Image (cartoon, rainbow, N blue to C red):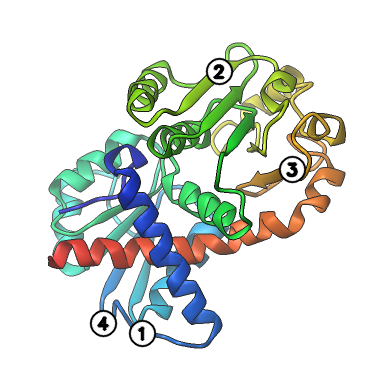
Amino acid sequence: MRHFLTLRDFTKEEILEIIDLGLSIKRNLKQKIYNNELKNQTLAMIFEKSSTRTRVSFETGMYQLGGHALFLSNRDIHLGRGEPVKDTARVISSMCDMVMIRTFEHSKIEEFASYSKVPVINGLTDSFHPVQLLADYMTLVEHGMHNNIIAAYVGDGNNMTHSWMMLAAKLGFELRIATPRGYEVNESILQEALLIAKESGAVIKTMNDPKEAVKGASVVTTDTWTSMGQEDEKEERIRIFNGFMVDDAMMSLAQDGAKFLHCLPAYRGLEVSEEVFEKHAQIVFDEAENRLHAQKGLMVWLDKQRNQ
């Protein structure tokens, strides 16, 4: 049984295979070709953290593949409200063909997967957001930016940063991470990524100067400074992250033709300026759309692995 909890669990070849499959499914969709790869199958979508893009992309994707998706919020199920995670996993996986979970603690999705009879997909945890990185890399492939990547991540050392580290480590490109002091990436995840990078040839650097990270980069990316559940810290974070906005001055330090990515929602005037966002709006919204196609590729891939 293969689950998709973090990119750490996949080889470079498997990641690229999923991307290629997603691109193929996308091309077919644009020609109105529906192959119904998951006909009559059901995806359970468990949301302990709400999301526009995650719900729309998984629900639409499952429909386009010929299956059906069930939306389950924490008000609809007993997960975390008395019933053990392992019991919820046993029940849902006995009735559905695949499960997507968007939750807080990564340990919860790991426990769920260990008791599940069907593939489990990480729609986001506090530690990782791997489906977003599939979409990000697919977008770079489509825009011809996937060769000789020098990526700069500017902002909070969060689940997006950790997933960028795993993607870089697996695919073997250079990643520079700039965070304010005290908001660095998780040290154990960093060490794990560095260990993988020794085999792939990836270069992963962490620093506190965003200009140093962006200088000469071909891809610049960021995320909101205040994630869900951190609302009480918003004003303090705005003060501490002063100087970390990706604006025209910062982008001017990157390579000519460098691309800007953002997983959305984007807060203009905070982590990115209005000018930079609008200049790169096309690729950012291609990136958003590719959540749909990358995840369809992933679900079809996981189903094939289960049936081999």
- The residue under label 2 is 206
Q: Secondary structure at mark 1?
A: loop
Between discs 2 and 4, the one toward the N terminus: 4
Residue 40 circle label: 4
Would residue 242 appear left or right of 163 to someone viewing this image? Answer: right
Instruction: Write the residue at 60% across / 34% down.
Output: 150
Where residue 259 appears, as percent x and y from the top left, is 70, 45
Residue under label 3, please give it: 267
Give the mark nearest the N terminus, 3 or 4.
Answer: 4
Q: Looking at the image, which is closer to me, 122 or 196?
A: 196
Q: Nearer the viewer, mark 1 or mark 4?
A: 1
Mark 1 or mark 4: which comes first in sequence?
1
What is the distance, in whole Å, between disc 2 and disc 1 at their CAs?
A: 44 Å
Labelled disc at residue 35: 1
Q: Compared with residue 13, is residue 248 higher up or lower down, i.e. above or below?
A: above
Instruction: Give how far apart the Cα atoms at labels 2 and 3 are.
Output: 24 Å
What's under tag 4, amino acid-wise? Asn
**Crowding at mark 2 (Cα within 10 Å: few <14, some 14-19, many 20+):** some
Q: Residue at x 65, y 16 (%)?
A: 180
Q: Amino acid at mark 1?
A: Asn
Q: Which label number is shown at residue 88?
A: none
Q: CA distance from mark 2 to mark 4?
A: 46 Å
Disc 4 crowd rating (10 Å Cα; few below 14, some 14-19, many 20+) is few
Q: Identify which residue, 194 or 68, lies in the foreground.
A: 194
Name the side, left or right, on which 265 lies relative to 79: right
